[in-house]
Amino acid sequence: MGDHKKAPMPINAEQSKLLESALRIKILNVLATEAHTSKQVADLLGKTPGNVHYHIQKLYDGGLLDLVNTQAVGGVMEKYYRSKNTFFKPETFTAFHFLEEVPPYQVATRLLLSEGQYQDFIDELDTLIRKWEAKDTDGAEYGVLFTLGRVQDSDAGSIN
């Protein structure tokens, strides 16, 4: 599928539900640059083949992966998958259910950006998110939601 540094893919509520797993996000990232079998993905992620195969099948059935090649190898049909995208735009957002004992980090600000700076900001944010999604860790799972939008003129503050 070419370049995966593209606009977020619109997804429905069912597809959004499929992405509520850090392992599935890792699978999508592994399959973003090169097609692999579920066994190859399992080896790359250090996970069991059965577990990864289950998640790949769910992502494929949900329309988030493409089947790009099949090869018969020693009587076994190997299926090669590729992710359609690694960034998604849900039609509706189901809020994360955060643990009360670990307060979520929140920040709000306003930025003055030219069109070029706006795109640079998005590119830097995409790079940062991809970097952290690709990390191999057994740590706790965190939800990340970031919204960047142009404020209405009536809502914009004035700077003197």
Image: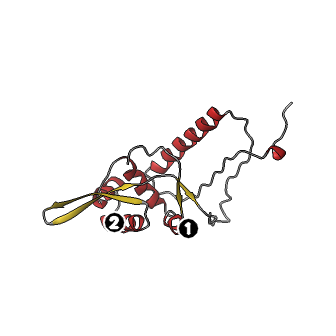
Of residues 49 and 38, the one nearer the viewer is 38
Camera-side residue of 23 and 8: 8
* Residue 105 x %, y %: 67, 53
- Name the residue located 43 percent from the left edge and 63 percent from the top edge: 63
Q: Tell me: residue 127, above or below residue 146.
A: above
Amino acid of disc 1: Ala
CB atoms of marks 2 and 1 within 8 Å: no
**Numbered circle sitting on residue 41:** none
Residue that label 1 marks: 13
Label 2: how many Cα within 10 Å (few below 14, some 14–19, many 20+): some
Work out which quarter of the rendered image holds the C terminus and state it.
top right
Q: Earlier in the sequence, mark 2 or mark 1?
A: 1
Direction from residue 104 to residue 40 in the image, left or right: left
> Horizontally, is 56 left or right of 10 in the view?
left
Residue 1 at what x, y percent from top left?
A: 37, 49
Residue 131 on image: x %, y % = 49, 44
Spatial CA span between label 2 and label 1? 23 Å
Q: Which mark is residue 53?
A: 2
Q: Residue at x 35, y 61 (%)?
A: 47
Image point (49%, 46%), residue name: 130
| Position of 22 relative to 7 (above/below) | below
- Residue 43 drawn at (x, y percent): 30, 56
